[in-house]
Each structure stands twice: as structure tokens, then as C-alpha cells.
Image: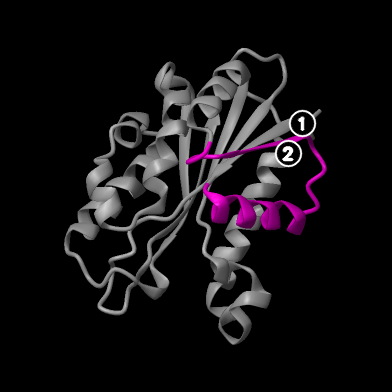
Amino acid sequence: MITAIGFAPHPPLLVPEVASGAAPELDTLRAACEQLVADLDAICDSLILIGSDQGLAIGRWLLARVGWTSPLLEFDVFAEPVRISAELSQAMNSDERIAALVMGDGSACRSLKAPGYFDERSIDFDDSIAKALSTADATTLENLDQNLATELLAAGGQVWPFAARVVATEPQRWRGELRYRDDPYGVSYFVALWTRVGIPSTTGP
């Protein structure tokens, strides 16, 4: 079954070699992402990585960063939406402990220098995402206004609903934890972990 879902952003600047002199600016975010992946490794036997091309690339980098060795499946949210849903449904009925890592950013309209310039609608939009991630609120993520997400350049808008549908069948069995939220460069980044209640880690006794 799926026992945990991790949420991480996918800015290329997360990679120090890409960020170059700006790398220290994202040290806190980078550390939060690495800890998230390490925690997923501790509570699952295999992983399903979901994102866009960019999301998958950054996801692979994070996994390599922490020395990930468990089985891995990757799905492009734009190329394989039907297959993702089928795989997640199958994973829910598996005897294995499976985690999902969902890669996506919040709005890119948080400041005048943001990629999408400032849009005041980004405030409420990102606040609702942060609240949903902190409480494992699947309903909010599953029913995101996709038009608004597109207008706000929120890359997570297409990805988060897949995770939400996993939780929606048994919302009372999930716990949410928002570990990071900030908007450097005018783009909202979230790091969060949803865990199924009562599942021990693979490193436990």
C-alpha cells in the first residue's frame, strides 16, 4: 500500500552546480528536500516519482543526493496521466510499503520580480495549498482550480491532485506535516510529508 507521500518543489537552482553563487540562498530548502527523501526511504520499500520533465529530473537528483537504492518508478504527469492513476491504484492494493514523491511548485507570481510578475491572487492560492499540505487535506488539492493554477504559473497544480486521490478514499488515516514554505525569487516552494497513521518505518524494530 502507499504509506507516505512527499511533496517537493523542482527549481533547477536547487542543484548547487546550477545555482552557482546563489546556491547558499536555497540551503534551507535543499536540506528540507533531502531530509524528506531520506524519511521516505525509511518508511517505504519502493517509490513512485511523479512530475513534469523538470520535476522528474530534480527528483532524480534528490534521490541520488541521499543515495537512494530502493526500487523506483517514474511517471511524467503530462505524458502518462492515465498510467499514473492506474499505477497508484495498484500500489494502494500492494503488500509492499510504497511511497510517492510528487514534484511541483506553487505560484510564480509572488513579487514584482517573479516570473509571472505580482498577482494578488497568488496570496490566497498559496495559503490554501500550505494549509492543505499541513493537514493532509486531499479535497482541496483534488479540486484545485486548474485555470487559476495555470494563470499563476503554479507547476504543482497538475501534479498534486494525483496524490490527493490516493488519500481521498481514507482521509482520516493520513497525517500531514508542512516542513518548509517560502517564496524566494517570487515562486512559492513547499516541502511536506503525508504519512499513513500506524505504519512503522523500515528501519524500526
67 magenta-colored: yes
The crowd level at tag 1 (other Cα within 10 Å; few <14, some 14-19, many 20+) is: few
* Viewport quadrant of the N terminus: top right
Percent coordinates x, y for residue 173 in the rendering: 48, 21
Residue visible at 58% across and 58% down?
Answer: 32
Between the residue at mark 2 and the residue at mark 1, the CA separation in whole angstroms equals 5 Å
| Residue 113 picture quarter | bottom left
- Secondary element at tag 2: helix
Total labels drawn? 2
Left or right of residue 72, residue 69 in this image: right
Percent coordinates x, y for residue 41 in the rendering: 72, 40
* Labels 2 and 1: the sequence-earlier one: 2
125 magenta-colored: no
Percent coordinates x, y for residue 57 in the rendering: 63, 55
Residue visible at 35% across and 40% down?
Answer: 132
Residue visible at 69% across and 27% down?
Answer: 200
Q: Are marks 2 and 1 in contact (CB under 8 Å)?
A: yes
- Per the image, the residue denoted by label 2 is 42
The crowd level at tag 2 (other Cα within 10 Å; few <14, some 14-19, many 20+) is: some
Please state which of residues 167 and 83 is positioned toward the viewer in this rendering: 83
* Amino acid type assigned to the residue bearing label 1 in the image: Thr
- Per the image, the residue denoted by label 1 is 202
* Amino acid type assigned to the residue bearing label 2 in the image: Ala
**Residue extending farthest bottom:** 21
